[in-house]
Image (spheres, coloured by chain):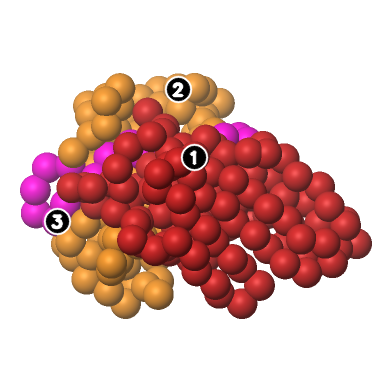
Chain colours: A orange, B red
Amino acid sequence: GAVVSQHPSWVICKSGTSVKIECRSLDFQATTMFWYRQFPKQSLMLMATSNEGSKATYEQGVEKDKFLINHASLTLSTLTVTSAHPEDSSFYICSEAGVPGTQYFGPGTRLLVL
Amino acid sequence: SQQGEEDPQALSIQEGENATMNCSYKTSINNLQWYRQNSGRGLVHLILIRSNEREKHSGRLRVTLDTSKKSSSLLITASRAADTASYFCATGIQGAQKLVFGQGTRLTINP
């Protein structure tokens, strides 16, 4: 399957700051990527679908102005958590759409907001 | 919102025994997939079963799908300590690319 990387793998920041997480497709041109959030001992919750060259589609209840997604190239999507607060602390995972209907997941980014 | 429910939420068995996890869903699907997640890591795709399939095998994994009951099961035979992980089912929804994940089963294999 495709190889997806995320950077950074973990980040600690102060409340009120913004954090950018990168998701890269290393061997595949990904027109569609997905961003998930996972709280401890819970499942993955889809936050948004990121389409190359167009606006992301956000799931109900996800604030698009707080979680900015940019998918400017076929190999890179970024998620920026703006004005992060402690409740944003979570494990953020990206994936890229594979065929047929599968997804290839990145290793995840653990965010801790103090 | 999540549509999948899995049971049990946690399962602890002895090495060598078989482990069975169940998943139920609510809407029409294109396919159902099972993923494994080791603690604090990303997800690894295990197996995909299409809506017109009833059973699929891959190594020590056996997946069944009953679309009339909207349910699936994952059987891991001859479990090993390395199988310790969380297992999630995910449904590919008709008309959409996205996946909807179940709540997961935390499997512990005791040596």
N-terminal of the two: label 2 or label 3?
A: 3
Crowding around mark 2 (Cα neighbors within 10 Å: few <14, some 14 to 19, many 20+) is: some
Is the residue at mark 1 from the same chain as the one at mark 3? no
Quarter occupied by residue A99: bottom left
For the point 51% across and 50% down, which residue is it? B72
B41 in relation to B45, above or below: above
Q: Is the Cβ of the residue at disc 1 closer than 8 Å to that at disc 2? A: no
User: Is disc 1 placed on a helix, strand or loop?
Assistant: strand
For the point 51% across and 31% down, which residue is it? A89
Q: Nearer the viewer, residue B2 or B94?
A: B94
Q: Nearer the viewer, mark 2 or mark 3?
A: 3
For the point 37% across and 73% down, which residue is it? A2
Q: Is the Cβ of the residue at disc 1 closer than 8 Å to that at disc 3? A: no
Q: How many badges with numbers are in the image?
A: 3
Q: Is residue B41 something one can see in this rendering?
A: no
- Residue topped by disc 2: A85
Q: CA distance from mark 2 to mark 3?
A: 28 Å
For the point 50% across and 69% down, which residue is it? B56
Please give the range of residues in magenta: A40-56
Pinpoint residue A25: horizontal percent, then vertical percent: 32, 67
- Residue topped by disc 3: A52
Q: Quadrant of the C terminus of chain A?
A: top right
Is the residue at mark 2 from the same chain as the one at mark 3? yes
Pinpoint residue B54: horizontal percent, then vertical percent: 45, 61
Pinpoint residue B70: horizontal percent, then vertical percent: 43, 42
- Residue topped by disc 1: B24
User: Is disc 3 placed on a helix, strand or loop?
Assistant: loop
Q: Nearer the viewer, mark 1 or mark 3?
A: 1
Q: CA distance from mark 1 to mark 2?
A: 34 Å
Q: Quadrant of the N terminus of chain A?
A: bottom left
User: In the rendered structure, does residue A35 fall within the stretch colored magenta?
Assistant: no
Q: Nearer the viewer, residue A41 or A84?
A: A41
